[in-house]
Structures are given as C-alpha cells and as structure tokens.
C-alpha cells in the first residue's frame, strides 16, 4: 500500500491536493497483521472491516451485484488475462 500511495502522490497528486490516503478493504480485520504491516509507515492508511449490505437502504442494496456476482466477474477477468 505504501508503494501505491507514494506513486499516486508523486505522479498524480496536484499541489493543492491532500496526501493520498490508502484504504484496504478486507472481509475480516486482523489487528496483529495490521499492526505489523503498517509499523513505521508515515502515510495515512486505514484498516477496517465492513458490512456493506446492512449499511445500505434495501432498495439500493438490491440494485447492486451480489458478492457471488462480483467474485465470478473477477474470476472470469483473471482467466481471460491468463489467456492473453
């Protein structure tokens, strides 16, 4: 994450922009792994678990793809990349 934040800050960030914030979305939050992974990192990086479907109104949630749909799409993209 530090690498990606550094590249964005160096290559894409404008002088008036704030420093890039790294955000890692995970199914579960492991405090020990997060602590060791981020030790000695100066950049703002957030670690959190989340549950998207409970935070969205039912009408909006039903219009989004399911986790299974997203996983199938990503899996298909990876298979297609490997054939190139």
Image (cartoon, helix red, strand yellow):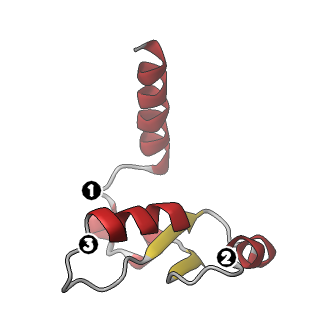
Indicate whether 42 appears above or below 24: below
Quarter of the figure that contains the N terminus: bottom right
**Label 3, label 2: how far apart the Cα atoms are:** 22 Å
Who is closer to the viewer here, 35 or 69? 35
Using a 10 Å C-alpha cutoff, classify the residue at mark 1 as few (fewer than 14 neighbours), some (14 to 19) or many (20 or more). Answer: few
Q: Looking at the rendering, which quadrant does residue 36 occupy? A: bottom right
Q: Secondary structure at mark 3?
A: loop
Q: Residue shown at 36%/82% (left/top)?
A: 19
Q: Looking at the rendering, which quadrant does residue 48 occupy? A: bottom right
Indicate whether 53 appears above or below 63: below
Q: Which residue is mark 2?
A: 38
Q: Which residue is mark 1?
A: 63
User: Is disc 3 in contact with disc 2, using a CB cutoff of under 8 Å?
Assistant: no
Q: Residue shown at 32%/58% (left/top)?
A: 62
**Label 1, label 2: how far apart the Cα atoms are:** 36 Å
Q: Residue shown at 61%/62% (left/top)?
A: 27
Q: Secondary structure at mark 1?
A: loop
Q: Which residue is mark 3?
A: 13
Q: Residue shown at 71%/74% (left/top)?
A: 34
**Label 1, label 3: how far apart the Cα atoms are:** 33 Å
Mark positioned earlier in the residue sequence (3 or 2): 3
Q: Is residue 14 left or right of residue 72?
A: left
Using a 10 Å C-alpha cutoff, classify the residue at mark 3 as few (fewer than 14 neighbours), some (14 to 19) or many (20 or more). Answer: some
Q: Secondary structure at mark 2?
A: helix
Can residue 1 be seen in the rendering of this structure?
A: no
State which mark lies toward you, 1 or 2.
2
Mark positioned earlier in the residue sequence (1 or 3): 3
State which mark lies toward you, 3 or 2.
3
Mark positioned earlier in the residue sequence (1 or 2): 2
User: Residue 16: where, in percent of width, then height?
Assistant: 18, 86
User: Residue 49: where, in percent of width, then height?
Assistant: 59, 74
Indicate whether 68 appears above or below 40: above
């Amino acid at each position: 994450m530090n690498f990606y934040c550094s590249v964005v800050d160096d290559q894409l960030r404008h002088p008036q922009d704030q420093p890039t914030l790294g955000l890692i979305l995970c199914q579960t939050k492991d405090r020990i792994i997060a602590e060791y992974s981020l030790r000695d990192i100066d950049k703002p990086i957030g670690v959190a678990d989340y549950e998207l479907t409970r935070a969205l109104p039912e009408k909006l949630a039903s219009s989004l793809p399911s986790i299974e749909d997203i996983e199938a799409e990503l899996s298909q993209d990876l298979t297609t990349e490997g054939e190139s």
